[in-house]
Image: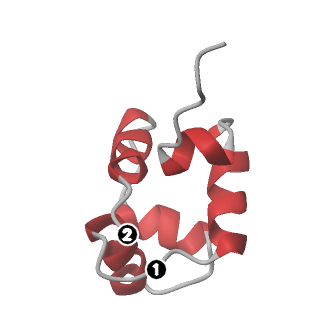
Amino acid sequence: MYFPRLRDLREDKDKTQVEIAELLSMNRSVYRRYENGTREVPVWAVIALAQYYGVTTDYLLGVKTPKR
């Protein structure tokens, strides 16, 4: 699954893939695959990234809430 917000949030913070990969204690190539959508992002990484960026996991995953 592809999450374009991963790249957008990273670039908004002026961070490199290497810096985010280090934050998650992984190799850059693994994180790059998350951004490209060629590898599933594990739940623990989604939570860690949402906390780091100060957003909800729903926002990070692109979940739209229904209008009330």
Find the distance from the CA under tag 2 to the CA under tag 1.
Answer: 6 Å
- The residue nearer to you, when weighing 16 against 10, is 10
Q: Residue at x 26, y 69 (%)?
A: 36
Residue 30 image position (x, y, % from top left): 40, 85
Residue 40 image position (x, y, % from top left): 46, 79
* Colour scheme shown: secondary structure
Element type at mark 1:
loop
Q: Of the residues shown, which amino acid type is indicated by label 1?
A: Glu
Which residue ends up furthest to the front in the rendered image? 68
Left or right placement of residue 65 versus residue 38 in this view: right
Q: What residue does disc 1 label?
A: 40
Q: Of the residues shown, which amino acid type is indicated by label 2?
A: Met
Q: Mark 2 or mark 1: which comes first in sequence?
A: 2
Of the 4 image quadrants, the one containing the C terminus is top right
Looking at the image, residue 20 lies above or below residue 51: below
Of the 4 image quadrants, the one containing the N terminus is bottom left
Residue 24 image position (x, y, % from top left): 62, 73
For residue 63, the mark is: none
Tell me, yes or no, whether the two marked residues, 2 and 1, touch with CB atoms within 8 Å: yes
Q: Quadrant of residue 23?
A: bottom right
- The residue nearer to you, when weighing 27 against 43, is 43
Left or right placement of residue 68 versus residue 28 in this view: right
Q: Residue at x 39, y 72 (%)?
A: 34
Element type at mark 2:
loop
Looking at the image, residue 12 lies above or below residue 17: above
Q: What residue does disc 2 label?
A: 1
- The residue nearer to you, when weighing 9 against 61, is 61
Looking at the image, residue 5 lies above or below residue 27: above
Which residue ends up furthest to the top in the rendered image? 68
Q: Residue at x 52, y 34 (%)?
A: 64
Dot 1 surroundings within 10 Å: few (below 14), some, or many (20 or more)?
A: some
Looking at the image, residue 15 lies above or below residue 25: above
